[in-house]
Amino acid sequence: MKWNEILNKRKGKSMTNWINQDWLKILQEKGFRITKPLRIITDILASSNHILNPTQVYLEAREEYPKIGLVTVYRTMEKLEEAGLIERVHMPDGCQSFFQAAAGHQHLLICTKCSKAEYFEGDNLGTLFNRTGQSFGYEITNHWLQLFGLCQDCQLKHTNNPT
């Protein structure tokens, strides 16, 4: 079963109860050995609603498994990305973080203060992209869109504490 099929089937249901087990099942079907570090890393990524970079995952994983190495975290996150379970997020500062992959093609909205991330659909963007491609003689084959700003919680904190 593919990740998009699982997400579409489970839309609207609580993700925290099922996502990590489904990830492990997908990885096992793809021939991955389910090790303790893999379980810990998938649990961290599957349960987060914030973008995370490998160092953040490493520091959190060490709390549960002190022997884990940073290289293991990087390699595992690469495998999760290849399996389509997480997506790479390109930050304005050039650093790369990761977030749970979405069902189908969606776009990310990312808080620049707390790193909270949410997907949104951009159905009406296709027309803009096609028109832009046509006016420059391009055939648009793919696009990637990430919007950065302050989430409601961070806006409230900033309004109440404008230092």
Image (spheres, rainbow, N blue to C red):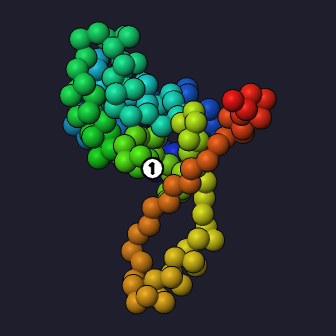
Picture coordinates of residue 101, whole percent (x, y): 45, 46
Q: Is residue 81 left or right of residue 112?
A: left
Horizontal side, residue 95 vs residue 31: left or right: right
Q: Amino acid at mark 1?
A: Pro
Residue that carries the numbered disc 1 in the rendered image: 92
Which quadrant of the view contains residue 157? top right
State the residue at coordinates (30%, 25%).
38
Q: Residue at x 33, y 14 (%)?
A: 62
Which element carries disc 1, helix, strand or loop? loop
Of 94 and 162, nearer the camera is 162
Residue farthest along the front direction in this orientation:
163
Quadrant of the image containing the C terminus: top right
Q: Report x, y in % for residue 17.
A: 55, 26
Q: Is residue 152 left or right of residue 45?
A: right
Report whether residue 106 is seen: yes
Is 88 rendered above or below residue 38?
A: below
Name the side, left or right, on which 9 lies relative to 62. right
- Res. 5 visible in picture: no
> Which residue lies at the image location 47% right of the left edge and 88% below the top edge?
134
- Farthest residue to the right: give it: 160
